[in-house]
Image: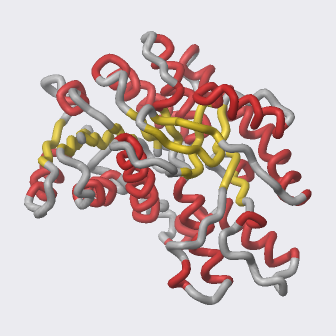
């Protein structure tokens, strides 16, 4: 099982690489970045887990060497909150994957995910290797935040690993829609509408909380690395044949035509991408689940998310046609 991290020396890339090295299902780990990746690789290589670790830089076909034989490629590359720069970085990395490892499962962390996932897809289409089942936007941090914040409200942080809240829509601001009515652990009946609105806002804008706490000197890197490793771990387990793994992720709805079409009907909009609970399988997306039973307030949040989500998707598609985000 070969995992590749593109952007491995950065704020997300280093802790993500550490967590993937700690995953015993990974037997090879390739780290690529424009600087420092060989040093990160040597450091990680001393850890007593099965994965053989190698680091690569751009010279001497480094990207191609890193990607050769890849099963799972995770992309945290980029600069926090610089959408235009990140779009170009993701496009160039996607070109490398499309030419060297077109069958790999591609997990996109680089923001803005609502636009970078369509960028990867459009690059793959241009190279004639697009398979919608194999490209994922990692929205897991929204799910992790929801679990954490709900467990805090329940007054028992030890519940957080078992609290499950589906988070749908996209991966920025108002496009993030937590379906709190479907929480595995119901919220206290005493929680009023204002408190629920505050919880939703905190899940949607949790990234701002981190940026503020870091005095603008950084964004959510460690929690994002944890979330990325969690999602990568689920994809790896599914590839190895484990059944029944369902997790929210931002996917092309053509990856499961039946489920995708049913979801579009629920949304009342013909979107190409959406984050919904997805069952993972050996070929990637096995089944897209619908929204299920949601409250009128949650439906209002979904409807409020659609215009921005649609605009973000169109921006990503247009960027590959004419590079400007």
Within the image, what quadrant is residue 274 found in? top right
Residue 39, x across and y down, in percent = 13, 51
Residue 74 seen: no
Quadrant housing the C terminus:
top right
Residue 131 seen: yes
Q: Residue furthest bottom?
A: 155
Residue at the (44%, 32%) spot, across then down: 283
Residue 293, x across and y down, in percent = 82, 55
Q: Residue furthest right?
A: 296
Residue 81, x across and y down, in percent = 53, 48
Instruction: Determine whether, in the image, residue 41 is placed left or right of residue 186.
Output: left
How was this image coloured?
secondary structure
Quadrant housing the N terminus:
top left
In the image, 246 versus 301, the foreground residue is 246
Residue at the (71%, 59%) spot, across then down: 178
Does residue 138 sit above or below 293 in this rendering? above
Instruction: Determine whether, in the image, residue 112 is placed left or right of residue 25.
Output: right
Tag count in the figure? 0
Does residue 107 sit above or below 129 in this rendering? below
Instruction: Determine whether, in the image, residue 55 is placed left or right of residue 93.
Output: left
Does residue 323 sit above or below 181 in this rendering? above
In the image, 241 versus 310, the foreground residue is 241
Residue at the (48%, 19%) spot, across then down: 130
Residue at the (58%, 36%) spot, across then down: 251
Residue 20, x across and y down, in percent = 28, 54
Within the image, what quadrant is residue 289 found in? top right
């Amino acid at each position: 099982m070969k995992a590749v991290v593109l952007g491995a020396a950065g704020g997300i890339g280093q802790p993500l690489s550490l967590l993937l090295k700690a995953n015993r299902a990974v037997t090879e780990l390739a780290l690529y970045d424009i600087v420092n990746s060989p040093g990160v690789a040597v450091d990680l290589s001393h850890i007593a887990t099965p994965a053989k670790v190698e680091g690569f830089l751009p010279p001497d076909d480094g990207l191609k060497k890193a990607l050769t034989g890849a099963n799972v490629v995770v992309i945290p590359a980029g600069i926090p909150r610089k959408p235009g720069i990140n779009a170009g970085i993701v496009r160039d990395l996607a070109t490398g994957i499309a030419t060297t490892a077109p069958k790999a499962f591609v997990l996109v962390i680089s923001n803005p995910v609502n636009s970078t996932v369509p960028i990867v897809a459009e690059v793959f289409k241009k190279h004639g290797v697009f398979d919608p089942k194999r490209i994922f936007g990692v929205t897991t941090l929204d799910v992790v935040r929801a679990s954490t914040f709900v467990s805090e409200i329940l007054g028992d942080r030890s519940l957080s690993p078992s609290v499950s809240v589906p988070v749908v829509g996209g991966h920025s601001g108002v496009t993030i829609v937590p379906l709190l009515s479907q929480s595995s652990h119901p919220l206290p009946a005493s929680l009023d509408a204002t408190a629920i609105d505050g919880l939703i806002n905190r899940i949607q804008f949790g990234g701002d909380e981190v940026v503020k706490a870091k005095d603008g000197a950084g964004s959510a890197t460690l929690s994002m690395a944890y979330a990325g490793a969690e999602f990568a771990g689920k994809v790896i387990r599914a590839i190895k044949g484990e059944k029944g793994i369902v997790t929210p992720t931002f996917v092309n709805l053509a990856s499961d035509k039946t489920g995708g079409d049913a979801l579009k009907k629920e949304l009342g909009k013909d979107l190409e991408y959406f984050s919904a609970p997805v069952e993972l399988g050996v070929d990637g997306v096995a089944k897209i689940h619908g929204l299920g039973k949601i409250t009128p307030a949650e439906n209002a949040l979904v409807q409020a998310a659609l215009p921005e989500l649609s605009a973000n998707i169109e921006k990503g598609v247009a960027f590959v046609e004419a590079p400007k985000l």
